Image (cartoon, rainbow, N blue to C red):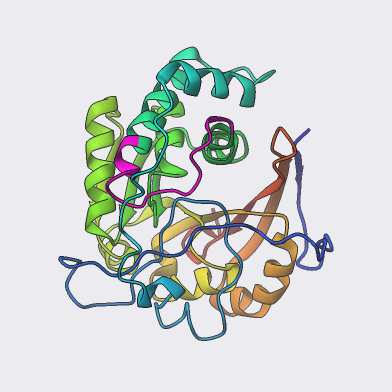
Amino acid sequence: MPKRSRRDAGAGEPDPRETPLGEEAPARAAGQPPPGPAPDAPTGGEPVPEAPAGVAAAGLGAAEAEPDDLAGRPDTPLSSLDELRAALDWAFAGIEIESRVLDLYARHARLLLEANREVNLTAIVDPREMAAKHYLDSWRVTQYVPLFGKSALDLGSGAGFPGLPIAIAERETRMTVLDSTRKRVDFLEAAVTALGISNAKAVWARGEDHLARTHVDVVLMRAVSSVRENVRTLRKVRHALKDLVMLKGPSWSREVRAAEREAERLGFKLDTVCEHRLPGEMGERAVLIYRAPGGQGR
């Protein structure tokens, strides 16, 4: 059963044998946004471990030096819609959720697999793994964070996680899925149109640039960087958001402790930690909810 609790930064000692899995950050591609603040490092994969000191702060990931990172995976298996839908039924077993939502998740998954042959969007291609690690993990946010009537920004959305599954499930949430890589945004735009997600839009920009122009209620970050580097990324625009929600793996407590001083200095206060376990022994996940400076005093 999912666990929801208020935590201090020292709670929950991680198992040293467990390391969050994740995909590499994308390489810079031709035609990216004009020079400005450091780009985000979106992946749309699973939660990733903390970057080496100074790397994420400089806006550089390991894949910056890998020009083929955006190259597609032509051997991506194309599971059928029926297979993908069955996998979603398995992942969401026992959960009350509209059939419409799972149908759209299956269609998005099929679009993702097709596009993955041309552009590197995800390393997770097994139907059950996709259902649990992409869609169930993203959907869990809707159970922990009040989103009705709010504006949300999925910063570093990659293939659309967690933003598109949330937008599909929460039709009264105004969702922006943002990425600094043009090819990934092309996929996001195509998916939003093909699936008819009227409450979502895709934006090609850097997170800091967008938040300097547009205030939102909630910023979502998944598979971008560590907690410490995420709050650093938002330091100049921290008053442009009310809540910062990060999706993390089993080592979340270690990241929270490492970020405690930086988060406190910048005015981000950890409010709630919501833990849950993925089916099929696929691991534990946590949703961290920070109150941002722009939302305090509500």
Q: Position of residue 113 (x, y in %)?
A: 37, 36
Residues 52 and 150: in front is: 52
Residues 214 and 246: in front is: 246
Q: Position of residue 233 (x, y in %)?
A: 44, 73
Residues 285 and 108: in front is: 108
At x 81% / y 66%, what residue is drawn? 16
Q: Quadrant of residue 59?
A: bottom left
Left or right of 235: which side holds 48? right
Q: In the image, is residue 89 above or below residue 162?
A: above
State the count of labels. 0
Magenta stretch encompasses residue 144: no
Q: Position of residue 11 (x, y in %)?
A: 82, 62
Magenta stretch encompasses residue 118: yes
At x 52% / y 70%, what residue is drawn? 231
Please identify the residue farthest to the front as the structure is shown: 75
At x 23% / y 41%, what residue is drawn? 189
**What stretch of residues is rendered in magenta?**
114-128
Q: In the image, is residue 134 above or below residue 17?
A: above
Please identify the residue farthest to the bottom as the structure is shown: 54
